[in-house]
Image (cartoon, rainbow, N blue to C red):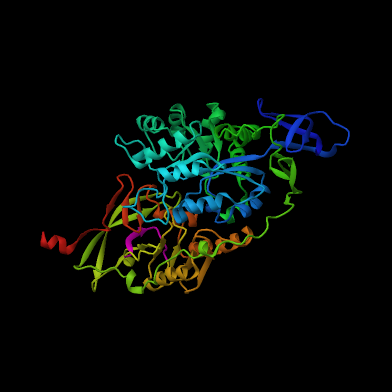
């Protein structure tokens, strides 16, 4: 039996959301008690620092950091995160159940629990092609895994609240039968009280989408637990949450964190700093990054510094700036002076996990849209540079020598190439607010189906970009106006890097900077690109099946009308 005492520290008291000066004793993996010391205990001087529970992130996707669980563990432990609940729906879209189990079976210091992906594909097989799918039987199989504690975000609101029987409703029922008391995570796009009520009646009672003060009030009153990610941390939202005393009814989550963002800014600790910058007390913000997420996920042994609970603890020298001195995981020190003590070992992965893009090379001609007549009205996805949303617009474009001259209208061509071995024809659409310079960008990290998405205004560069991804088995690339390729390889399933996160971050930052230089304006260039193919995110998106109007889940044509249509009546 090993034991130690941390003394001369301010200890966070969860029930009161305050700090009290004292000492804390740890025996083996657990907290033993306060202000007591036994013979043989190792004594650690906390030097007047602040001892807090390890941070808990209950809604996130490790693949969004484009890395493996062990490498992710190394990165976030240095930021005080000691436990996460991950939804591996990106891995599920590529590999299916077998790949998800492989991913869950990784070992690392960070405690990683999982939520079963509930929407794979995010819509249905008529609207997108994936490498794997999650249905009722798959849910029952995954529910038996010891790391599974929740159902992942239910994104298909339409099917979840339908009167008739749907696959989404069957998945919810199967999970509830397998794990009756476990939570169901949501992706709630409801904007009325009736829609919120229908969503909760379906069994789904959380939401991590973009919030406003009005939505916070409506959703919380409907019984929806709010998971606040970075884009929802605004002065107005924080004021609504604090004045409404909603602390037991929300937590902070990261959802998607790019590797360069993680290296530069941090993880959950970054969100706490943002909340404090918007006038939330540190003690209140901490409550919603430790206690409330633990309660939501029924992690009874975590979230507070109390006897009998796991000794997942963070020692801060400066709480206002969240300066970390040490991190203890299950009573073992894993971070000292802000640095990881022992990195995870390098792992070897099966070759088949890195040979998943199965398509013949594309040609320049595939990206030259042809039409008859003199003019055409195009249905265009108008990209919002701040969010991941688009709106639907119509733009009249000239036809020159039988080719749609979308470039003169300031548009990009966007296309999706199916990559799972079916050799389907390219799906073609048009984008407003894309790349403004003579360039192209492509990615196999295209949410959620992870086919190959490409945008641009130069057919030759678009073909180059897609073929580079096929050759290198996945990644993100931008070919700039000087024909220079900026490339971040993601060989594991076409969506995950096997490199240390700092090296990965450097490569991704190069692609991000190149896209910005090519005129692609966005709060998050990589995510804004990747979600152009997400058919559950408003309003007009593209998959390998074509353009999809998200609210009706209907395939629509990229061409609304041509001059020839008018002439022939």
Horizontal and vertical percent position of residue 488: 54, 64
Q: Which of the two residues, 190 or 83, is positioned nearer the viewer here?
A: 83
Q: Over which residues does the magenta segment extend?
A: 425-436
Kindly indicate the quadrant of the structure image that contains residue 365: bottom left
Kindly indicate the quadrant of the structure image that contains residue 55: top right
Q: Is residue 300 magenta?
A: no
Query: Quarter holding the N terminus?
Result: top right
Q: How many marks?
A: 0
- Answer above or below: position of 454 versus 87: below
Q: Is residue 276 left or right of residue 374?
A: right
Horizontal and vertical percent position of residue 335: 73, 48
Which residue is depicted at the point 65% across and 25% down? 15
- Answer above or below: position of 551 versus 178: below
Q: Is residue 258 left or right of residue 49?
A: left
Which residue is depicted at the point 32% across and 44% down? 551
Horizontal and vertical percent position of residue 511: 52, 64
Which residue is depicted at the point 20% across and 67% down? 374
Query: Quarter holding the C terminus?
Result: bottom left
Q: Residue 523: tell me if it is visible.
A: no
Q: Which of the two residues, 537 or 201, is positioned nearer the viewer here?
A: 201
């Amino acid at each position: 039996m090993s034991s130690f005492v941390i003394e001369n520290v301010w200890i966070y008291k969860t029930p009161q959301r305050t700090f009290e000066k004292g000492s804390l004793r740890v025996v083996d993996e657990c907290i033993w008690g306060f202000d007591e010391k036994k013979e043989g205990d190792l004594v650690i001087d906390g030097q007047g620092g602040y001892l807090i529970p390890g941070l808990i992130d209950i809604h996130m996707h490790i693949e969004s950091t484009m890395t493996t669980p062990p490498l992710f563990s190394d990165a976030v432990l240095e930021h005080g995160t000691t436990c996460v609940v991950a939804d591996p729906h990106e891995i599920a879209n590529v590999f299916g159940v077998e790949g998800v189990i492989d991913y869950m079976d990784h070992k690392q210091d960070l405690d990683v629990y999982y939520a079963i992906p509930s929407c794979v594909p995010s819509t249905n097989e008529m609207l997108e092609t994936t490498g794997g799918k999650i249905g009722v039987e798959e849910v029952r199989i995954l529910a038996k895994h010891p790391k599974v504690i929740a159902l992942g975000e239910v994104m298909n609101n339409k099917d979840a609240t339908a009167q008739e029987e749907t696959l989404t409703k069957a998945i919810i029922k199967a999970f509830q039968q397998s794990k009756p008391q476990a939570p169901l995570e949501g992706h709630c796009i409801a904007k009325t009280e009736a829609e919120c009520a229908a969503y909760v009646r379906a069994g789904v009672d959380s939401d991590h989408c973009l919030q406003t003060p009005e939505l916070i009030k409506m959703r919380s009153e409907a019984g929806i637990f709010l998971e606040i990610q970075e884009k929802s941390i605004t002065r107005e939202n924080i004021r609504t949450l604090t004045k409404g005393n909603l602390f037991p009814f929300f937590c902070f989550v990261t959802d998607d964190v790019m590797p360069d963002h993680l290296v530069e800014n941090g993880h959950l600790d970054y969100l706490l700093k943002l909340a404090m910058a918007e006038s939330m007390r540190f003690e209140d913000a901490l409550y919603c990054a430790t206690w409330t997420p633990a309660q939501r996920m029924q992690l009874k042994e975590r979230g507070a510094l109390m006897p009998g609970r796991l000794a997942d603890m963070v020692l801060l020298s400066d709480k206002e700036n969240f300066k970390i001195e040490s991190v203890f995981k299950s009573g073992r020190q894993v971070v000292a002076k802000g640095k990881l003590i022992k990195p995870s070992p390098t792992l070897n992965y099966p070759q088949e996990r890195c040979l998943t893009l199965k398509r013949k090379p594309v040609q320049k001609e595939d990206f030259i849209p042809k039409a008859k007549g003199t003019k055409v009205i195009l249905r265009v996805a108008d990209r919002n540079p701040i969010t991941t949303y688009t709106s639907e617009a119509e733009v009249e474009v000239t036809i020159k020598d039988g080719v749609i001259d979308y470039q003169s209208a300031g548009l990009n061509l966007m296309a999706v190439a199916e990559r799972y071995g079916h050799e389907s024809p390219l799906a073609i659409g048009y984008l407003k607010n894309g790349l403004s310079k003579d360039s192209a960008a492509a990615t196999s990290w295209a949410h959620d189906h992870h086919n190959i998405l490409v945008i641009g205004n130069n057919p030759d560069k678009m073909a180059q970009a897609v073929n580079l991804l096929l050759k290198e088995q996945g990644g993100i690339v931008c070919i700039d106006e000087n024909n220079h390729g900026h490339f971040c390889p993601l060989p594991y399933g076409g969506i995950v890097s096997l490199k240390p996160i700092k090296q990965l971050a450097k490569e991704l930052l190069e692609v991000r900077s190149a896209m910005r230089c090519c005129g692609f304006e966005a709060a998050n260039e990589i995510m804004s690109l990747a979600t152009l193919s997400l058919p559950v995110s408003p309003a007009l998106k593209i998959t390998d099946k074509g353009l999809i109007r998200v609210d009706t889940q209907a395939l629509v044509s990229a061409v609304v009308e041509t001059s020839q249509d008018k002439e022939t009546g």
